[in-house]
Amino acid sequence: MKFCFAPMEGITGYPFRNAFQQCFPGIDRFYTPFLSANDTFSFTTREIRDTAPENNRVPDLVPQIITNNAEMFVWAIEEMISLGYREVNLNVGCPSGTVVAKGKGSGMLRYPDRLDEFFEESFELLQKKGINYLSDSSEASAASPSVRISVKTRIGLHDTSEAEDIITIYNRYPISEVIVHGRVQKEFYRGEIHLDVFGNFVEACKHHLVYNGDIYSKEDFEKIVRLFPGIDTVMIGRGLLMNPSLVREINGGERATLPEIKHFHETLIDNYIPEMGSDKNLLFKVKEYWNWLSKSFSGSERYMKDIRKAKSLAEYRAAVRNLMANCDLV
């Protein structure tokens, strides 16, 4: 089984990825938070730093692109190829209202015909530019630019019945992999995963499938393996943010100890210091992550108030020490 770490905007940038890999190895593939390919035909400084190969010390990193324009998508692919990447992932899953309103992320699912046209235009442009696209996991050729194009998708915008058309569209194109989160956009992360619809993907989608959604424990993982024995790759996001040792536990290891969590936390701070440039920016990042990590500690909410109120790194560290001294790992 292969394990992928789902991207989380604002959290899983390269300082986080490097700290996670150092302290809790076992993830086979990481994905960048989405890079916006827009009409400026340029990435932000943050996006450039996040994809710079010299900044990333993880086994495998896939840049994720968000756009609804084929020309911009192909430009972004060329930029990633120039950095040495041989796979890009198209975000067709982000449920954010502001993203969807622009027709991006899972907003691309609103009009299946436009999604179909997007892929047709993208692959035609790649062909015109002499860029080979690989529809499987075979190695890219060193003789000419080659790339795998994977997709992270929801199963619809409003209703699960939309999944049939979505599968049909994906099947038309040489996509290397489809990562499926089994909710529609309007559900965000609420309610149960539609496992029956994921089963439809297993039956009808001709591409390599990755399961994504609501794996928070070893038991959750084992349920998915039991239901879909042909699945050999899963993507986990929130479960790993809350419990960084989750993959280790799935593989038969022990849950993270308090010293391990402390070491991970300090490593994360050390990685953020040169990147953030100020205590204010650093605190914003680590406080945001504590909204997830705090769920690994019983009774943490009363102590989270002090973490959120901290105005200096010293105050923040004191608040974290207080939480860890008074709350048990669960």
Image (cartoon, helix red, strand yellow):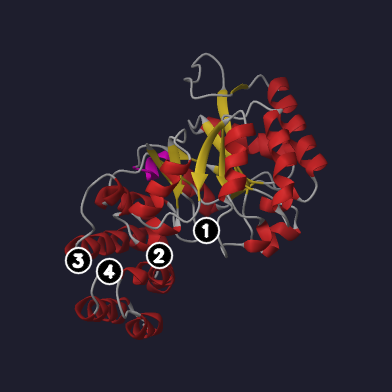
- Which residue is labeled 4 in the image? 330
Against 155, residue 310 (above or below) is: below
Where does residue 285 sit, x and y in percent of width and height?
42, 67
Q: Secondary structure at mark 3?
A: helix
Report crowding for label 4: few under 14, some 14 to 19, many 20 or more residues within 10 A (C-alpha).
few
Residue at 42% from the left image edge and 71% from the top image edge? 291
User: Real-space Cα distance between discs 2 and 4?
Assistant: 34 Å
Image quadrant in which the N terminus is located: top left
Q: Secondary structure at mark 2?
A: loop
- Which residue is labeled 3 in the image? 258
The quarter of the picture where residue 233 lies is top left
In this view, the residue in front, 319 or 80, is: 319
User: Real-space Cα distance between discs 4 and 1?
Assistant: 26 Å
User: Real-space Cα distance between discs 2 and 1?
Assistant: 19 Å
Q: Nearer the viewer, mark 3 or mark 4?
A: 4
Q: Secondary structure at mark 1?
A: loop
The range drawn in magenta is 52-57
Residue 251 horizontal side relative to residue 106, left or right: left
Name the N-terminal-most of marks 2 and 4: 2
- Which residue is labeled 2 in the image? 277
Going by the picture, which residue comes out furthest to the left? 259
Residue at 59% from the left image edge and 30% from the top image edge? 207
Name the N-terminal-most of marks 2 and 1: 1
User: Real-space Cα distance between discs 3 and 2?
Assistant: 28 Å
In this view, the residue in front, 280 or 30, is: 30
- Which residue is labeled 1 in the image? 9
